[in-house]
């Protein structure tokens, strides 16, 4: 994997770790009585290079977080939904190295970084809990780095589909429906591979009955078959 992709995967890992931290009790303390803002589909919450340090706590909707590589490719670190935070990387850098774009109409609470720090300063027990949580979150995030390092598109696609099922999955008979519309290009940006290769892998899953599309264009997955998938022996 190129050095550029190594940087991208490290940023994705750090993003995954931080988003797990700014949840739960932290939100219960920080969010009450704050104004909710509405963002339309395809609206950019923030862009690469923006100097504004703001967290966006998603109350309802879907947002994709990622970056643009030097050669112009878009890569998606993660898809965020209700209860998630977006913009967490501003906690470690003053200038944005990621970008966030609304996938579905979204309601969120925007809070400046300085106010987040003030809350932590006033709640030392919360700060202690966050430090403990950070260790576990980093371990999970490094799993994401390992996934990006595997040079097998089918394996990475299967892993991404399992993650999406865990976040957005709803029962649909014997299958699980990913309850948000994602294009094949967006899936490719999550897998970190060319759309053509991801399309070929997805078509293979469809031929085997592991994946198909609903009438609304949502993915339907056979989770038992997906969990049973094994990467090829090297």
Image (tube, rainbow, N blue to C red):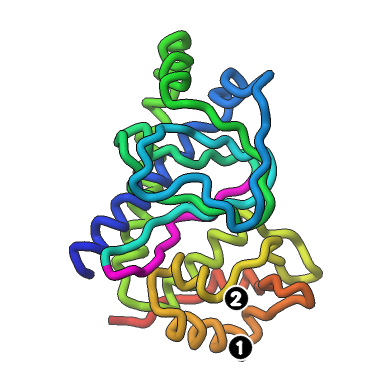
Q: Is residue 8 above or below residue 127?
A: below
Q: Give 123 or 115, whichever is nearer the viewer.
A: 115
Question: What residue do we see at 70% from left, 66% from top?
Answer: 176
Front residue of this view, candidates 81 and 208: 81
Residue 123 falls inside the magenta stretch: no
Q: Which residues are magenta?
A: 71-81
Instruction: Please name the residue shown 43% across and 37% down the image.
Output: 88
Q: Characterize the local packing of mark 2: few (<14), some (14-19) or many (20 or more) Cα atoms within 10 angstroms.
A: few
Q: Quadrant of the N terminus?
A: bottom left
Residue found at x 62% / y 71%: 224
Residue 117 sits in quarter: top left
Where does residue 228 sit, x and y in percent of width and height? 53, 73
Q: Residue 225: which disc?
A: 2
Left or right: 134 as drawn, with respect to 221:
left
Q: Residues within 10 Å of mark 1 (few under 14, many from 20)?
A: few
Q: Earlier in the sequence, mark 2 or mark 1?
A: 1
Magenta span includes 72: yes
On screen, residue 31 versus residue 152, left or right, reads right
Q: Are marks 2 and 1 in contact (CB under 8 Å)?
A: yes
């Amino acid at each position: 994997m190129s050095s550029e992709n190594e940087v991208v995967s490290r940023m994705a890992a750090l993003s995954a770790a931080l988003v797990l931290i700014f949840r739960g009790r932290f939100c219960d303390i920080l969010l009450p009585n704050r104004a909710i803002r509405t963002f339309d589909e395809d609206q950019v919450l923030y862009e690469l290079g923006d100097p504004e340090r703001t967290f966006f706590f998603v109350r309802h909707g879907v947002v994709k977080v990622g970056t643009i590589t030097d050669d112009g490719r878009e890569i998606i670190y993660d898809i965020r939904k209700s209860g998630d935070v977006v913009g967490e990387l501003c906690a470690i850098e003053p200038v944005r190295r990621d970008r966030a774009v609304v996938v579905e109409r979204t309601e969120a609470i925007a809070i400046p970084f300085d106010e987040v720090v003030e809350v932590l300063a006033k709640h030392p027990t919360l700060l202690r809990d966050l430090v403990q949580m950070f260790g576990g979150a980093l371990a999970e995030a490094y799993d994401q780095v390992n996934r990006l390092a595997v040079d097998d598109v089918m394996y990475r696609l299967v892993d991404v589909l399992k993650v999406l099922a865990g976040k957005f999955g709803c029962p649909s008979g014997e299958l699980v429906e990913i309850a948000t519309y994602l294009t094949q290009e967006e899936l490719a940006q999550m897998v970190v591979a060319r759309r053509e290769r991801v399309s070929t892998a997805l078509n293979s899953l469809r031929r085997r009955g592991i994946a198909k599309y609903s009438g609304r264009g949502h993915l339907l997955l056979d989770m038992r078959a997906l969990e049973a998938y094994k990467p090829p022996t090297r």
